[in-house]
Image (spheres, coloured by chain):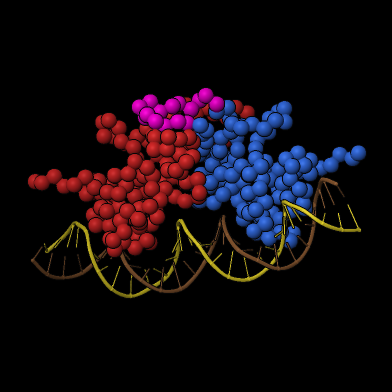
Chain colours: A blue, B red, C yellow, D brown
Amino acid sequence: MFEKNKSEQLLRQYGLKVTSNRLLVLDVLMSSRTALSHGEIQKKIQGSRLDKVTLYRTLDTFVKHDIAHKVASEDRNWLYALHPIDENDSVRNDHAHFICDYCERIYCLPVETRNTVPLPESEEGFVIRTHEYRLHGVCPQCH
Amino acid sequence: MFEKNKSEQLLRQYGLKVTSNRLLVLDVLMSSRTALSHGEIQKKIQGSRLDKVTLYRTLDTFVKHDIAHKVASEDRNWLYALHPIDENDSVRNDHAHFICDYCERIYCLPVETRNTVPLPESEEGFVIRTHEYRLHGVCPQCH
DNA sequence: ATAATAATGCAATAGAGTTGCAATAACGGT
DNA sequence: ACCGTTATTGCAACTCTATTGCATTATTAT
């Protein structure tokens, strides 16, 4: 049998129906180094007859099924990105979000963050379950 | 001379004109353990004739003059909080944001975060200038 | 090929935050 | 204590992101 393209494999693997919309959006996410907003994705696929509501729902579906994750941008929009992939093609749960102070793009950097978050010393009653690193600075494009 | 109240002192100290609106908002922020949204602040001061636009602008002013800082909430709204204060009454720049998975409230915890952020290993060209820790879990109110 | 079910498109709506402008208040100088 | 300058405030209208309801269409297991 022929090897199906990667997006299609991924959708089946996660038990999602394969639709042209999902393939389209997945391709866009796979080929981006940065997390993308709804608007940015729309621009990249303009021409295709994909409704904005469907795009929102498609992205939500990806997040719900843990194909992608979403990050709140500095200007209070959601940005979407696939999970960073290891050298071994396995998903890394630990990564940092790098926010460029100039272009405002957000990158997912595969940083080892486990066990590096210091627990609050004098704060009682706070139980930490997960964490997010947000790094601010200048990205390679902007200097 | 009489000791002016703390909010007024703070405003003068930062070179801002003292207005009843600013005093009001500052008092609300000072008496809250969590970062507050525009809507939450409005609720706490309902009755006073303070327009929503003025509230936005007041909060922006506080942020611009570094009296307060703003955090993006999980549902993509801005939350506002004063900077955590030391035992010595000096402002701490390093603190973590603790987000409760149940009540969604965000607390500023005075955690020592300096020098604990691991730099990306294999990622070249990213210059880190500041960072934000976001801790997720359960707050004291919710268990 | 067909039925069951999920995905999609469209219209209307919600909600946070912003802009322009005229009215008002704060405050340094007199 | 008053006055003029300048910043702050309130109001109306608006922008933009995202959501909801519902009828239509497409996908997939059988």
Q: Residue A9: in sight, yes or no?
A: yes
The one nearer the camera, B43 or B35, is B43
**Residue B27 x %, y %:** 27, 49
- Taking the image as drawn, is residue B94 in sight? no
Magenta stretch: helix, strand or loop mostly: loop
Identify the residue shown where x is 72% and y is 27%.
A88
Tell me where the magenta segment starts and ends, as one range: A114-128
Quadrant, the C terminus of chain A: top right
Q: Quadrant of residue C21?
A: bottom left
Quarter of image, res B125: top right
Question: Horizontal placement of C18 versus A109: left or right?
Answer: left
The residue that appears at 58% across and 33% down in the rendered structure is: A95
User: To which quarter of the image does residue D12 belong?
Assistant: bottom left
> How many dots with numbers?
0
Q: Give the percent coordinates (x, y) of residue A42.
A: 66, 56
Q: Residue at x 39, y 38 (%)?
A: B141
Residue D7: percent from the left, percent from the top? Answer: 30, 59
Q: Please say whether residue A105 is one of the residues in the magenta stretch.
A: no
Q: Is residue A54 left or right of residue C12?
A: right
Between B87 and A32, the one lying in front of the other is B87
